[in-house]
Amino acid sequence: LFPTAAAAARYVAREIDKLIRARNAAGKSTVLGLATGSTPVGLYRELIRLHQEEGLDFSRVITFNLDEYYPMPKEDPHSYFRWMHETFFHHVNIPWENIHIPDGTLAKEEIDAFCAEYERKIKAAGGIDIQILGIGRTGHIGFNEPGSPRNSRTRLVTLDSITRRDAAPGFFGEENVPHHAITMGVATILEARRIFLMAFGEHKASIVYKAVEQPPTEAISASFLQEHPDATVVLDPAAAAELT
Ligand code: F6R
């Protein structure tokens, strides 16, 4: 629990910084699992500052993003592809070939093979060292909406109506929000060696309480983090308000 979201972001950035520097010193790569949305913006800002002002070198970093809307052209203002490049990738020195984001431009019949290949690439990179997560009001991590099995993998999913409603302002209306997304699965996420779930603001308080204090359930995919050996929930006071 941190006094502010900015302080929380600095903490997570420091943990990432320490790992990248240790791996760089050993000549090894660091694999990061990344999220979009409002929650990690301060984290990306701090990582950019560490790169620009404190020499943090991302040249051996490999990234896998959690999700992308489907269908979604890469250049669309709403694409997570574009958001990640504008918010983070353009400002650090991650080699472009090290960046992986689910592809919203695939033909339907290409999706299954793409998802299997995404899983294979994560494994080939050595697995995810640090996974960054936000949490949706449905309890989703990635876009693993209620009902997503504990053993789910990267796949095409249907977005919950609450998730589409929450995204509506950015799309100028719920009718413009895609109905589908490609997301890493719950099992994909849980295989990361270390996980930080970040949540800030009073609108997250109720779902944070359910995810952290109620028994793990498919109805709230974030609750499965309780079964992970190294998952940290990083909160500001407003998001922590309903914890007992
Ligand atoms: C985004 C993602 C989602 C968001 C969640 C919270 O890549 O996977 O699970 O983390 O919907 O979104 P914000 O941070 O906008 O409240």
Image (cartoon, helix red, strand yellow):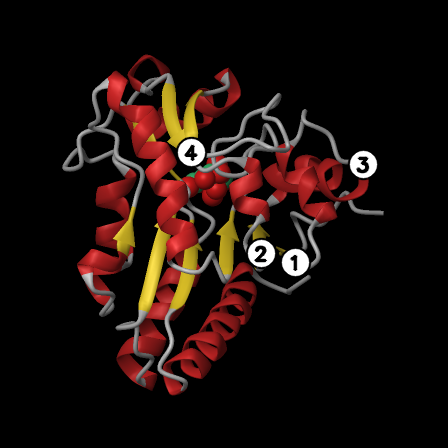
Looking at the image, is mark 1 or mark 4 earlier in the sequence? Answer: 4
Which residue is more in the foreground, 226 or 114? 114
Residue 73 picture quarter: top left
Looking at the image, is mark 4 or mark 2 earlier in the sequence? Answer: 4
Q: Residues within 10 Å of mark 4 (few under 14, many from 20)?
A: many
Residue 232, numbered label: 1
Q: Nearer the viewer, mark 3 or mark 4?
A: 4
Looking at the image, is mark 3 or mark 2 earlier in the sequence? Answer: 2
Give the distance between the C-alpha atoms of the residues marked 1 and 3, in whole angstroms.
16 Å
Where is mark 3, residue-wise? 214
Give the distance between the C-alpha atoms of the residues marked 4 and 2, in whole angstroms.
17 Å
Q: Nearer the viewer, mark 3 or mark 2?
A: 2
Q: Residue furthest left?
A: 75
Q: Amino acid at mark 3?
A: Gln
Where is mark 2, residue-wise? 195
Relative to 227, 180 lies left or right: left
